[in-house]
Amino acid sequence: MTETLESIAQAMVAPGKGILAADESSGTIKKRFDAINVASTEDNRRDYRELLFRTDEAMQKYISGVILFDETIRQKAKDGTPLVDLIKKAGAIPGIKVDAGAKPMAGFPGETVTEGLDGLRERLAEYYDLGARFAKWRAVIDIGDGIPTNACIEANAEALARYAALCQEAKIVPIVEPEVLMDGSHTADRCFEVTEATLRTVFNRLALHNVKLEGTILKPNMIVSGKKCPTQAGVEEVAEKTIACFKRTVPAAIPGIVFLSGGQSDEDATAHLDAMNKIGGFPWKMSFSYGRALQAAPQKAWAGKAENVPAAQKAFLHRARMNSLATLGEWQSSLEKSA
Ligand code: 5MM
């Protein structure tokens, strides 16, 4: 079959499958390794990611694609096999994070704009040759006193649209990730308001830049209460509000919405996704592109020790399976307890 943007995007949200976000940049993976007392060396990062990509059952049955960091897309497994080949062998699609990070926005204290457009055309061509068929760019929108400003939302949406257009020119599917952070004490309704405004602007800019929606995947936050909000929205409320917000703002031509976990507990991230799919009645696939909610458990089980690799793989398989069930609305909390 000829590979098109549409066929790649459809494969990324194939039934029962979702994306493993393993694109932690150097600073973030160091933070994750610090938490398990593992030194963030090139070999340790390789060993850890290799154990994930060699979890055959998880990769073959539940993972449609993996988002990689620049180092990882060039890295080889201990036996010399390129890590990208392990991913492809499992039937998953390699992807690449191409943004250069969220940087303080001049004139707008407390807000950031994501950089990385300079030289992006050339980098995308190289990543295509290295095997990437989709990419990811994350914009960060924080909620606080007087923020986000329209200027911050507009600047980030414009960058996302320019990135997405360059990806499609390079035959690479863009994952468009505008993340409204769950840090802070705001309510779920405030999260709704900001996410709605953000998504409206993002889809406006995607249209302005002639981005083909059929070949684009959206990676958003769910509508949740801020972590420090005294009243926390329950599972049903999160599911209903998230669906309502997306029905208002996300065109039906988008093949899939793959959520980020954003600091939710593993089980909350699964329960919310499951509740949305149990409700159903929306035009897009709703799946996952979790980083922390797929990796926290295997990282803890691994703790940098070779003898813990089977336990870490078991933990990764379990989370991948639970989230796969959630994409079908077939998860139950009892499955967590029995495991
Ligand atoms: C895996 O974390 C990704 C990379 O973050 P940095 O650029 O800060 O290192 C991150 O973009 C991730 O893909 C998404 O935020 C989703 O991850 P979570 O952990 O929120 O599910």
Image (cartoon, helix red, strand yellow):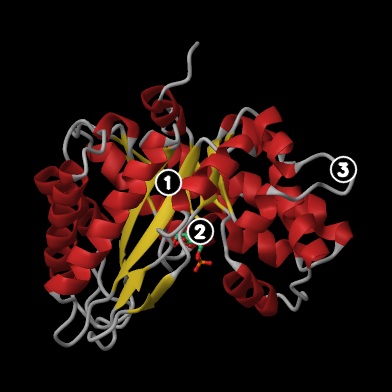
Does the numbered disc 2 mark a residue whose Cβ is under 8 Å from ligand 1? yes
Q: Mark 1 points at which residue?
A: 288
- Asked which secondary structure carries label 1, the reply is strand
Quick check: 298 above or below 113? Answer: above
49 or 112: which is nearer to us?
112
Q: Is residue 214 left or right of residue 169?
A: left
Q: Mark 2 points at which residue?
A: 293
Image height of 43 relative to 210, above or below: below
Q: Helix, strand or loop at disc 2?
A: helix
Q: Which of marks 3 and 2 is nearer the N terminus?
A: 3
Amino acid type for the residue under numbered disc 1: Phe
Which residue in the protein does label 3 denote? 80
Q: Dot 1, how many residues are within 10 Å of its Cα: few (below 14), some (14-19), or many (20+)?
A: many
Residue type indicated by callout 3: Gly
Asked whether the viewer can see residue 250, the reply is no
Question: Residue 220 location, x and y as percent?
Answer: 31, 54
* Left or right: 160 in relation to 93: left
Quadrant in the picture for residue 31: bottom right
Residue at 68% x, 79% y: name it. 34
Residue 241 on image: x %, y %: 16, 55
The mark closer to the camera, 1 or 3, is 3
How many other residues sit within 10 Å of disc 3, few (<14), some (14-19) or many (≥20)? few
Q: Is residue 329 left or right of residue 303?
A: left
Report if the CB atoms under discs 1 and 2 are less than 8 Å apart: yes
Residue at mark 1 to residue at mark 3: CA–CA distance: 30 Å
Badge 2 local density, few (<14 within 10 Å), some, or many (20+)? Answer: many
Mark nearest the camera among 3 and 2 is 3
Circle 2: residue type: Ala
In primary-sequence order, the first of circles 1 and 2 is 1
**Measured from the top left, where is residue 170 in percent x and y?**
44, 36
Quarter-wise, where is residue 47 in the image? bottom right
Please tell me which residue is depicted at 43% across the width and 60% down the height of the picture: 118
